[in-house]
Image (cartoon, rainbow, N blue to C red):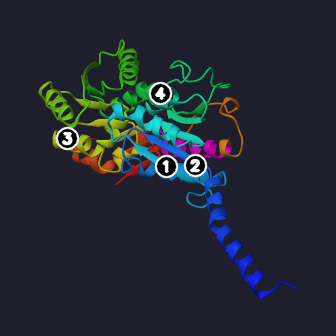
Amino acid sequence: MIRRREFITLIGGAAAMWPRAAQAQQAAMPVVGFLDPTSPDAEADRLRGFRQGLKHAGFAEGENVEIIYRFAENQSDRLPGLAVELVRRQVDVIATRSIGAFAAKAATSQIPIVFMLSEDPVRLGLVASLARPGGNLTGINFFSTELSAKRLEVMRELVPGATRVGVLVNPTNAMRATATVQDLQAAISGTGLQIQVLNAGSSHEINTAFETFVRGRMDALFVGTDPFFSNRRAQLVNLASRHALPATYSGRHYCEIGGLISYGSDTVDASRQIGVYVGRILKGAKPADLPVVQASKFELVINAETARMLRLDVPATLLARADEVIE
């Protein structure tokens, strides 16, 4: 029979072990590093998709997985330091997008990295091939730059009289800017359409670019795919509205706040797939064995109210193809 003093000592010792046991359990919780070039506000929809993907794979934030967020707030020079910080925290997986993939790759060759990227990751040297990535990276490729020609085609269908189109790209994301311009130049060959390309890597430069487009009497505007532009979408949409300039964008989040038309990959769905891949890696899968997924879900969104404000008649054929028409 256990005496009273021995019983108290036993219970006291067990109680003293409980905090250590809880700490051990907490330490065993996998940790995901989320590295993004923009800000939490700009990424709200994609974060929602990412968490949905994780949940689909069996992981819920705060319950059985911890997520450490690092946002560069559109200052790309901060990304390398933020990536190194996540590596020092010894996260189990890094989820990132766009130029964040390069910062993460430079920071570690051991920690798995899951990216969301619009350019060809093979051409950029991030993976050996789409089917067999090799190394510690894999992810989702959603071909936004390759969709440039299609976006231009849709814009011309909506604004058939357009002969001069302004093109806005971000020079700090040189690879994407160059790919966008090359795709558009190939698309306009033999069409008689003219483009004027301007760079904008800051809020002030966006204002200046619009002034130049207006002076040059552009018939329409093509806003390049870029995290910075996504973060400054309210400024871009407001300027296009103020100057009555029909504009095409890369995603529905522009149209939701008054942008005229967008065509591109469903980035929320792509973010969900990133979450699924991160979950699979947490369960033991290796990035080298997970093929890069090519996004197959694309969206055409038209803001009918903005079209009416610009006195544009949206063709019935375009309305029929639209995934959503915002009234």
Q: Does 284 lie within the magenta span? A: no
- From this viewpoint, which residue is outermost toward the top? 190
Q: Position of residue 43 (x, y in %)?
A: 41, 47
Label 2 sits on residue = 31
Position of the N terminus, as image quadrant, is bottom right
Q: Earlier in the sequence, mark 1 or mark 3?
A: 1
Mark in the foreground, 1 or 3: 1
Callout 1 amino acid: Ile
Which residues fall within the magenta stretch?
A: 265-280
**Disc 2 on helix, strand or loop?**
strand
Q: Position of residue 221 (x, y in %)?
A: 27, 31
For the residue pair 203 and 295, the one nearer the viewer reads as: 203
Give the CA separation, mark 2 to mark 4. 21 Å
Instruction: Give the residue number, with chain letter if any, for mark 3.
Output: 239
Mark closest to the chain's N terminus, 4 or 1? 1
| Label whose residue precedes the other's in the sequence (2 or 1) | 2
The label number, if any, that marks residue 68 in the structure image: 1
Question: Residue at point 53% right, 48% down?
Answer: 50
